[in-house]
Image (cartoon, grey):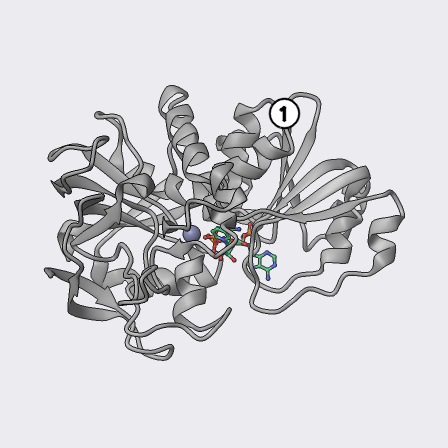
Amino acid sequence: MIKAKAYAARDEKTDLAPWDFERREVGPHDVQFDILYCGVCHSDLHQIKNDWFPGIFPMVPGHEIVGRVVKVGNHVTKFKVGDLAATGCMVDSCQVCENCKQDLEQYCLEGSTQTYNSMERDGSMPTYGGYSSTIVVREEFVLSLKEGVDLAAVAPLLCAGITTYSPLRHWKVGKGHKLAVLGLGGLGHMGVKFGVAFGAEVTVLSTSPAKEEDAKKLGAHHFVVTKDPEQIKAAMGTFDFILDTVSAPHDFNMYLSLLRTNGVMICVGVPPEPAQVAAFSLLGGRKSLAGSGIGGIKETQEMLDFCAENNIVSDIELIDIKDVTESYKRMEKGDVRYRFVIDMKTL
Ligand code: NAP
Ligand code: ZN
């Protein structure tokens, strides 16, 4: 077994604290890499709080992971010691179902193995995420990065990046479309960058008036304060797409009223409680309410390459790992500009 250090949650009520544990040995198809940076996703907070389902504790969160390879198995062909490497939200899947075969491992019919708060496919032990010193991942789920990129700012692409890139590509959002990005946090700010890069006219829908200047700097064309009834009234029936990145309960019916006829609202945010949606909110205007989960491995690599070619990275605040609980508190208040990333040498 491989000795590793981490920050872990002991249960859903206690703050994260240092924890020593062991990772599995590097198998023939595995890559081990030492972690340099790990992003802090709102999903980390949802999971340590048991917002979605009872978690597996101790839990080491973190699924925006970048680092350098220190060991590879005999059958590994894509990586060698010293290469940059990255991992996102998944570390395994069945690889043979119809979804896996179509590069949609995130929708594996047997369920993909999550980077943490999941069991290894052989059921032997839980998976542990990126708030740790080192990680072992099967080669197919390790992404390649180009040398010379800002690694700390690249880390959030592994979740916030692919989760917004994938639906915008799937629905072919681009020139001629009016796209609204709902919630300007980690996912939202990447949604703005991709929407702009793909040629859409982008509006940020935000509860935080203070984020307007940032939204414009990120490339957004318009900014709507959703707490202002006048601004909401003016935006009604205007968007082709809404990318909903909100982490807390919110009024779906109100946001659906902002779509044009045939408009699509795409949920990527995962509030703890289910939403109430009136059929009338959809049928008047033949609107669709859709969802999207992260992205497959092939598309994640495509997104990383697209970002490298177009100089797209995340806007980050680099933190010391001892401040991770503080970062959660700020994230809960919507005070994130626009992704916390842990400098893992502070572990
Ligand atoms: P985040 O950085 O905390 O951003 C969420 C933003 O939502 C906040 O900054 C805030 O923006 C807005 N917001 C918060 N509470 C709100 C409320 N009550 N009403 C309206 N807006 C509110 O979170 P994140 O890391 O981007 O994650 C967002 C969500 O996506 C989480 O639920 C996360 O679990 C989920 N997620 C899903 C996937 C997937 O595969 N689908 C992948 C990753 C994450 P403003 O200040 O602009 O209002
Ligand atoms: Zn995430």
Give percent across and percent down for residue 255: 73, 51
Q: In the structure shown, which secondary structural element does the residue marked by tag 1 occupy?
A: loop
220 left or right, relative to 12? right
Three-letter amino acid code of the residue under disc 1: Gly
Q: Residue at x 30, y 74 (%)?
A: 15
Give percent across and percent down for residue 7: 22, 65
Give percent across and percent down for residue 71: 11, 42
Q: Is residue 204 visible?
A: yes
Quadrant where the image shows the N terminus: bottom left
Give the residue pinned by disc 1.
174
From what the image shows, is residue 141 above or below residue 9?
above
Q: Quadrant of residue 309?
A: top left
From what the image shows, is residue 201 above or below residue 5?
above
Towards the viewer: 269 or 205? 269
Give percent across and percent down for residue 260: 81, 38
Q: Residue at x 21, y 52 (%)?
A: 135
Towards the viewer: 165 or 74? 74
| Circle 1 Cα neighbour tier, 10 Å, few/some/many (<14 / 14–19 / ≥20) | some
